[in-house]
Amino acid sequence: MKSILRALAIAALVVPFSIHAADELSEATVKKVDKAGGTVTLAHGPIANLGMPPMTMTFKAKDKAMLKKVKEGDKVRFRAEETGGAYTVVRIEAAK
């Protein structure tokens, strides 16, 4: 019984951090939007979930429609993931 309670206590501590990490957004400035090519170039801060330091790079967009929301010079928050060997923006929104 004690081991079950201990496991539940550990799960209660770990799950919120896991959920938060999955939602973590990085900050960036949009440098270029290529709607036809489905890419966006971002000057970004650290991307924790990818272990990536700050730099400027081009990302594929998971959905080209999300590129209609941003333009060069915009400050944004975004989520990037490695999918199919490419870094892909899966979420992007205006910075608050």
Image (cartoon, grey):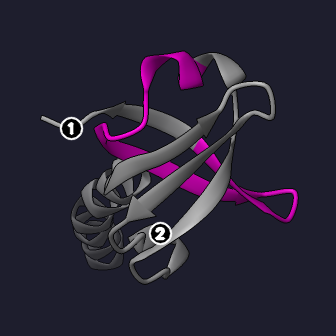
Which of the pair 69/26 is nearer the observer?
69
Mark 1 residue type? Ala
Which residue in the rendered view is the most extreme toward the left?
Answer: 96
Say which quarter of the image contains residue 12. Answer: bottom left
The residue positioned 58% from the left and 65% from the top of the image is: 57
The residue positioned 40% from the left and 73% from the top of the image is: 48
Total numbered labels: 2
The residue positioned 42% from the left and 37% from the top of the image is: 72
Span of residues in magenta: 66-89
Q: The C terminus lies in which quarter of the figure?
A: top left
Residue 75, x across and y down, in percent: 26, 42
Tell me, for residue 35, which label it has, or none. Answer: none
Which of the pair 76/6 is nearer the observer?
76
Provide the secondary structure element on which disc 2 rests.
Answer: helix
Say which quarter of the image contains residue 64. Answer: top right
Residue with the mark numbered 1: 95
Among the two numbered marks 1 and 2 on one chain, the one whose residue lies closer to the N terminus: 2
Residue 24, x across and y down, in percent: 33, 54
